[in-house]
Image (tube, rainbow, N blue to C red):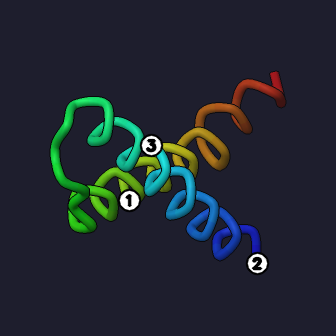
Amino acid sequence: MRYIMTVIWALLIGGVVSYVLTSMAGDPFNLNTSLIISAIIAVVIFVLGDGILKGNSQE
């Protein structure tokens, strides 16, 4: 369940970040770029949550 919620939040946050950055640059919004940013955010969260941060808390 936490993976599903992580993907949903990553899609929402990635979409907002992409929209704001393209609006500030004056470029048109591109959904593909937003999905790529969201996928990168989700992978980083998975790696940090299950790997790096979990390993450091047990020491």
Residue 40 rendering spot, x and y as whole percentages: 36, 50
Position above or below: 58 against 50: above
Residue 6 coordinates in the image, percent (x, y): 64, 62
- Are circles 2 and 1 on residues that touch, CB within 8 Å? no
Alpha carbon distance from label 3 to label 1: 13 Å
In-image side of 52 versus 26 (left or right): right
Circle 1 residues within 10 Å: few <14, some 14–19, many ≥20: some
Q: Residues within 10 Å of mark 3 (few under 14, many from 20)?
A: some
**Whole-percent x, y for residue 45 in the image:** 56, 46
Check if mark 3's residue and mark 1's residue have beta carbons within 8 Å. no
Distance from disc 2 to disc 3, alpha carbons, whole Å, reads 24 Å
Q: Residue 24, how many percent across, how many down?
A: 31, 31
Check disc 1 and report its element: helix, strand or loop.
helix
| Viewer-closest of 55 and 42 | 42
**How far apart are labels 2 and 1 at the CA level?**
17 Å
Question: Sequence-wise, which precedes: disc 2 or disc 3?
Answer: 2
Q: Element at badge 2?
A: loop
Q: Name the one closer to the observer, 51 or 17.
A: 17
Residue 29 in which image quadrant: bottom left
The kind of residue on which mark 1 rests is: Ala
Taking 57 as reference, is 35 above or below it? below
Which residue occupies 33% across, 64% down? 35
Q: Which residue is mark 3?
A: 17
Determine the residue positioned at 50% across, 64% down. Answer: 11
Q: Tell me the tag on residue 39.
A: 1
Q: Quadrant of the N terminus?
A: bottom right
**Residue tagged 2:** 1
Position of the C terminus, as image quadrant, is top right
Closer to the eye: label 3 or 1? 3
